[in-house]
Amino acid sequence: MQRDSKIYVAGHRGLVGSAILNNLKIKGYTNIVTRTHEELDLISCEEVANFFMEERPEYVFLAAAKVGGIVANNTYRGDFIYQNLMIQTNVIHHSYLNKVKKLLFLGSTCIYPKNCPQPIKEDYLLTGKLEYTNEPYAIAKIAGIRMCESYNLQYATNFIAAMPTNLYGPKDNFDLEKSHVLPALLRKMHLGKALETGNWEDIRSNLSIMPIEGVNANSDKRAILDIFRKYGIEAKNGKVQIEIWGSGRPMREFLWSEEMADACVFLMKEIDFEDIKREINSAEIRDTHINIGTGKDISIKDLAYLIKERVGFEGELFFNTNKADGTLKKVTEISKLQKLGWNSSISLEEGIAKFYVEFLKISSASEIWK
Ligand SMILES: NC(=O)C1=CN([C@@H]2O[C@H](COP(=O)(O)OP(=O)(O)OC[C@H]3O[C@@H](n4cnc5c(N)ncnc54)[C@H](OP(=O)(O)O)[C@@H]3O)[C@@H](O)[C@H]2O)C=CC1
Ligand SMILES: C[C@H]1O[C@H](OP(=O)(O)OP(=O)(O)OC[C@H]2O[C@@H](n3cnc4c(=O)[nH]c(N)nc43)[C@H](O)[C@@H]2O)[C@@H](O)[C@@H](O)C1=O
């Protein structure tokens, strides 16, 4: 990939896509093509076909997808399978038709069986039943992996599939229901702390930046407290209690999104499908995807207490076992990525500190309400 190669970043306003775009700019790539969702709906075959014929990108980062946390995946099961299948099928197929030199498809570690051995190696794929809460999303992602492999084998394309662990970072989704655990807990505890200290300016500022359906920055306190209770932030007898979904026992692995972007650009620059294929000692070429993670995990309970400490929330945490735990353990085996030459370096503690700084930048009362 040359500095002036034409590179399309699909999903450039999202958590990962925005970090890839930044990473490319920092590294001096100058010919980057982007389209917002409004400008190009990747679900539409016709729009995608026209876009590829007009723009003819040489390299494609496929970071556009329908994404969400455990509740979003479990609730919008039809949307997750349909939209992901359509987006990835359109982009991968038109990349092939338009002779894209290399494409990077992003999947997720939820593709692996719910109860597979740990840490999870790439070839554990399709060795058992999937976790129910995100099965439709996982099936779409598995189809994407096999589509990249099949096109590489039949058409000699150079499509790489990367499977990131749970990610967090700038431009994350802070919705209290549909987001992933780390942004959700950070925001809940920040609002909990504001309630504890009676900092209504901060609460109203946060609501103006990250609206919650049913209330806005100007709603009265009672309406805001009712909505907060619905989402597990509750003031009781002068104490604030935050709800943590599930038992707190599930283990998760977290990677800072800017590191994820760095790994993506590394794979795009340095690794070809042929390099991966060469390592496979079998006539059956499969499981050529690459895990991207840290190889370290933490329980949701310990994560919650880490966030509590960083935010400075002094109230209580309540583990609601009526809410789903999802997979109990999923930590990646990362030796394939390490052998290729990439390693993460930001610890979870460091990442959470950076994440809170980013959160405060967008949500800070002093910036907006002064
Ligand atoms: N976040 C995580 O923890 C993890 C993410 N991943 C994978 O990484 C990739 C990026 O995820 P992430 O950055 O978190 O997701 P985000 O939701 O932050 O971003 C997704 C992007 O895709 C765009 N998009 C969605 N639907 C369409 C569409 N129909 N047409 C055009 N653009 C569309 C969105 O645009 P708009 O906002 O305008 O709708 C948005 O820019 C995905 O493949 C995801 O599966 C894998 C593991 C973990
Ligand atoms: C990246 C990955 O993300 C999704 O899988 P997940 O890892 O289960 O995602 P999650 O971040 O939403 O939850 C992690 C754990 O945390 C617990 N938990 C506690 N309290 C909150 C909470 O307040 N919000 C959320 N979201 N979870 C909470 C929650 O109950 C679960 O035990 C996939 O659907 C799929 O999208 C995928 O690939």
Image: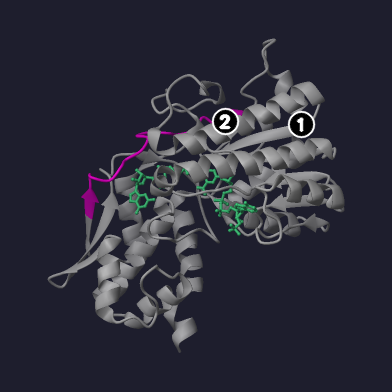
Q: Residue at x 64, y 27 (%)?
A: 146
Confirm if mark 1 falls within 8 A of ligand 1.
Answer: no
Regarding residue 28, the answer to whether it shows in the image is no
- In the image, residue 103 lies at what x, y percent? 74, 39
- In the image, residue 364 lies at what x, y percent? 45, 76
Residue with the mark numbered 1: 272
- In the image, residue 218 lies at what x, y percent? 37, 83
Q: Secondary structure at mark 2?
A: helix
Of tags 2 and 1, which is closer to the observer?
Answer: 2
Q: Which residues are magenta?
A: 318-336
Judge left or right: residue 166 versus residue 259: left
Residue located farthest toward the top when viewing the structure as drawn = 283
Q: Main secondary structure of the magenta part?
A: loop
Q: Residue at x 29, y 82 (%)?
A: 220
Dot 2 amino acid type: Ile
> Where residue 142 is drawn, which disc sits there?
2
